[in-house]
Amino acid sequence: MIYGDCVGRWGRSFPDKTALVDAITGRRYTYGALSLEVNRMAHFLAGELDIRKGDRVACLSLNRLEYITLFLALSRLGAILVPLNFRLAKGEFIYFLEDAAPRAIFFDRQHQGVVDAFKTDVEVPHYVCFDPDNSVGQSLPDLWNSLSPDSPEAVEIAPHDPQLIIYTSGTTGLPKGVLLTHGMLAWNAFNTILGWGLRPDDKTILHAAMFYTAGWNVFTLPIFHSRGVNILVQSFDADLILDLIGNEGVTVFFGVPTMFQMLLDSPKFASTDFSKVRFMVSGGAPLGQPLFEAFKTEKSVHIREGYGLTEVGPNCFMANGKLGTIGHPMPHVDVKLVDTNGREVPRGEEGEILLRGPNVCAGYLNKAEITARTIVDGWFHTGDLGKMDADGHMAIVGRLKDMIISGGVNIYPAEIERVMETHPAVAASAVIGVSDPKWGEVGKAVLELKPGAALSLAQLLDHLRDRLGKFKLPKYLAVVDELPRTPASGKVQKFVLKEKYGRACND
């Protein structure tokens, strides 16, 4: 099988090469040993649960080895993993399970109470716990040693076969199940390896939650494809991450800006050895110059700003460390910018980013109409607004739905947010549009301030006037304790801000 079994292939060719360091249990697995664990899981799925090609299997768990072996075993069988966001409420789980209709749910001890709560509301044939002594379903450890480590019967897998269904973060509304195919995930890995120059000696830390595309597709699967080492942790912990960077010789690392700030704020940051780190990648939200400069100055580490979506990779551009841009398209990604009429815009002008290539998803589960609107003639409409400079570097200027039209002029919130965050009192920011009788719409700044800081609208405008055109200046200000964000990627949920603060007044 070309698709679905890169770990198995390396297990046969390089059985003694380290594949995974489990920082949770302290165990280390070679590609040979990890492949045997995947074989056992595949035999359990096929033999005990009768999982076949095309079946869906959900998982509600914190990061752990069994989560990885479950995904890899399903991939070998041609079945599909549906990761569940463990931060959701009971009603939201029911929505996901009714939409995905899995034949089994795997879960850990921490979430067996949640599973027990929704079990009577959905019809799922099998419930399996990764841990012993659970009262909800089968316990995998009770059977594990009796399962065969031999390779399961081969299954024919095509590049268009679904491998993973990840539900979008829901920054603008109800989540949608994105159909990620074997071919798409393979091409994302190829793009990542070629575009960022991953090597067999690279090591990364798998800390992102596995219900999130970054948990699988930013480095985890590309690192497995490149025969590197994944270091598994249960969740992000700044002190632990710094220990692993220094002690394990981590070479590449991904995080969102909040995580980089937490690393910088840790008392262990100054003493951590970053000498093996080749580069770091930031995604999910704009990084900001202070963080970029801090890592560059104090640790000689360049943070590259990445860009992508669950539906398209997510590694779509080769970030090169030029602050404020996401770099050039990956080797096997086509890109163009279009206006609201679908016409391609000249270089230097803003337009919606459209992406095309083998890294595009197969659409949305049970949502044919939305799929048809989003993927047109092979081009995926991202809804993000970009601008390409003279050297071909792409910059993100905002979201199409977030764009403010004031007096017939387009205003891009991301540009204003980047400038506002250079103010020493501002920790994070967002700009939303509010109604105005004269201009139709004007900007309103929503700010999260640093501890002990205070800032008035007049003081903010004094900071912005020499940096932004007058028509871009926000007319109103709201100061909040914390901006609402998606749990996985940390993106600001502007639809929540518009509901709470979408009034033409200061809050």
Image (tube, helix red, strand yellow):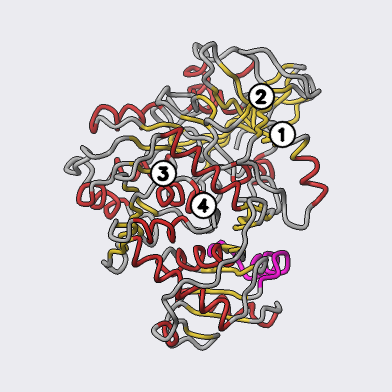
Residue 99 part of the magenta-drawn span: yes
Residue for badge 3: 255
Most common secondary structure along the magenta stretch: helix
Q: Position of residue 482 (x, y in %)?
A: 50, 46
Looking at the rendered structure, the secondary structure element under dot 4 is loop
N-term-proximal mark, 3 vs 2: 3
Please provide the residue range marked out in magenta: 85-102
N-term-proximal mark, 3 vs 1: 3
- Give the CA distance from mark 3 to mark 4: 11 Å
Looking at the rendered structure, the secondary structure element under dot 2 is strand
Looking at the rendered structure, the secondary structure element under dot 1 is strand
Residue type, numbered disc 2: Lys
Residue for badge 2: 336
N-term-proximal mark, 2 vs 1: 2
Residue for badge 4: 488
Residue drawn at x 27%, y 38% is 277
N-term-proximal mark, 4 vs 2: 2
* Residue closest to the eye, 130 or 408: 130
- Mark 2 Cα within 10 Å, few/some/many (few <14, many 20+)? some
- Give the CA distance from mark 4 to mark 2: 28 Å
